[in-house]
Image (cartoon, coloured by chain):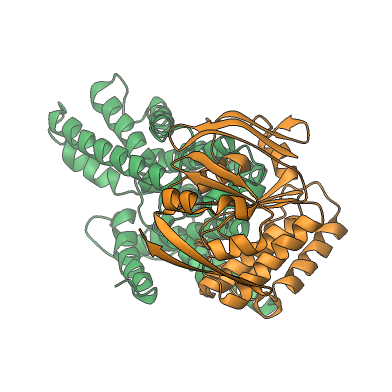
Amino acid sequence: MLELTNLSHSNRLLNISYKIPAGRLVGVIGANGSGKSTLLSILAGGLRKASGAAEWRGHNLLRWSPYEQRQQLAYLSQSNSFHEPVLVKDLLRTSQINLIESAQNLAAWRDKSVEEFQLHRLMNRSITELSGGEQRRVMLACVNAMNRPLILADEPTASLDLNYQLLVMDWLKALSVQGKLVLVALHDLALAAQYCDELMLLHEGKLLASGEPNQVFTDTNLALAYKVRVDWLCNNNGVAMLARRL
Amino acid sequence: MIIRSFAILACTLLLILWHLGSGGDNWSLLPSNELETFILNEIRLPRLLLAFCNGVALGLAGSVLQLLLRNPLAEPGITGIAGGAALATVVTLYWGAVGPVSWWLPAIGLVGGMLTLGLLWLLSGRQPQGIRIILVGVAISAISGALIAVVLNLAPNPFAFQEWALWLMGSVANRGWAYVWLILPLLIISILILITQRQYIQAQIFDEPTVRTFGFNESWSKFLLLLATALLVSASVVTAGIIGFIGLVAPHLVRLLGIRRPNQLIYGSGLIGGVLLVAVDALVQTINTRVELQLGVVIALIGAPWLLFLLHRSGRV
């Protein structure tokens, strides 16, 4: 259970209060600059000076030491920027730094991640020579290899092709079914509608609406948050949307 | 692998012999009389060690900064610490009551370097990001550079500018053992700091937001790494003046050798920096010029084209 109470950060995030039980896939959506990344960064411990509380397993996530936080959560940052030509396998190993786990567990998680994101061919390549999409897959594999109960993913599908977008969402869904709490910032509303159990719609730093996708995606909410009007096309295979500017 | 190691070892030994034998009119290694023994023990040996220590210090500092600031063009001068140490030394010499051979001079230079580190840290904010440290550092080094010029212009000694122009370009000539004993402990302390922070250094292959979630006490680790760099750079400045480019070039050379892991990169850069500076210093002694060329000059002459080559290779020029 993650319980946010009056979470604020300067003028970028204002009084967010929300309760999420574990085992849910929660989409954080909103226009550019609405506070999605800020929310995830605060929870990940990347932004200090936040006020309010984020209760997780009986502790305030914001007051825990970085080392204790580390044991709880895995964070995927928005951009992949790599500056050193390190090998993918070294990157994967380094992503497990500071975790209190047995070496066997860590190795098993790495192997599973390589499998999940089909990185076999890339293991001995240097990260800087990979394409944007391949780098993203490596980052996702790193998050998977950490195997933490709380996952915070900032636009995991960015720069991925359709196949991998779906693979990533399926993977996040599977993690949530395993009992992890997954908080994912998304720009693609169709993916959000199709996969997420709950949505948090942010608008100018405030929580505009929350709940199941059909409760959040009302015409008024979308008009206010995105300044668009949306027609939804749904069948058993998935969701698509047609949007036009207001 | 073994053959390669032997080749490197042999080259290094030859280099040391070349360095030790250089300096007189004729190349001579084995001392044949008391005077030559004295020259070897009191002039050439400390010069060799001082050059090596300086190269190691600058190689280490440069690679740590490139990793920490995530900038392949970062080098020790970028933090402004070298400028701060130089400024403190210049001010003390011309306006203080301290003579040029006093132990106080390098000590005050070190203090200047540390104060600059404090200033850099203060101005970089509570959660300093790489780019901010670079900008603040560039500003500080511009200010200290300008202040050095002002101090030299106002100095009571009319030859101040000539003297310090030479000193600021860096040299390990005529320093003696005292300077080796000055830089060596600082080098060891810094390496110990780097060893305690090896996990944090390893984590630097990820972007800053990600590293922040890796459970390190970020500010503290970053401060320790900057402290190590500041110690290395200040130690180098007070013992040999400002030697540019080694800190920039050494890490790139190591990368070209195919070494990618951050900790190996750092120590590799230290070693290559040391060897490189010994080589350049031997070259400086061998080239027959009226006045011995300054280390900084020769390294810039070799280093700058090297940098252009690197830029060309990465497709930016």
- Please name the residue shown 15% across and 26% down the image: B156
Lateral position of residue A62 relative to residue B14, left or right:
right
Q: Residue visible at 36% across and 35% down?
A: B85
Q: Position of residue B37 (x, y in %)?
A: 50, 51
Using the rendered image of the protein, determine whether residue A55 is visible from the camera's viewpoint.
Answer: yes
Q: Between residues B301 and B26, which one lies in front from this camera angle?
A: B301
- Percent x, y for residue A230? 47, 62
Percent across and percent down for residue B244 are 35, 53
Give the drawing colour for chain A. orange
Q: Nearer the viewer, residue B187 or A67?
A: A67
Q: Position of residue A210 (x, y in %)?
A: 60, 45
**Residue B184 seen in this snapshot:** no
> At 68% from the left edge and 77% from the top edge, which residue is drawn?
B1
Residue B24 vertical position relative to residue B147 in the rendered view, above or below: below
Where is A55 relative to A128, above or below?
Answer: above
Residue that extends furthest to the top in the rendered view of this protein? B97
As displayed, is residue B166 above or below residue A229? above
Colour used to depict chain B in the structure image: green
Is B198 or A90 nearer to us in this picture? A90
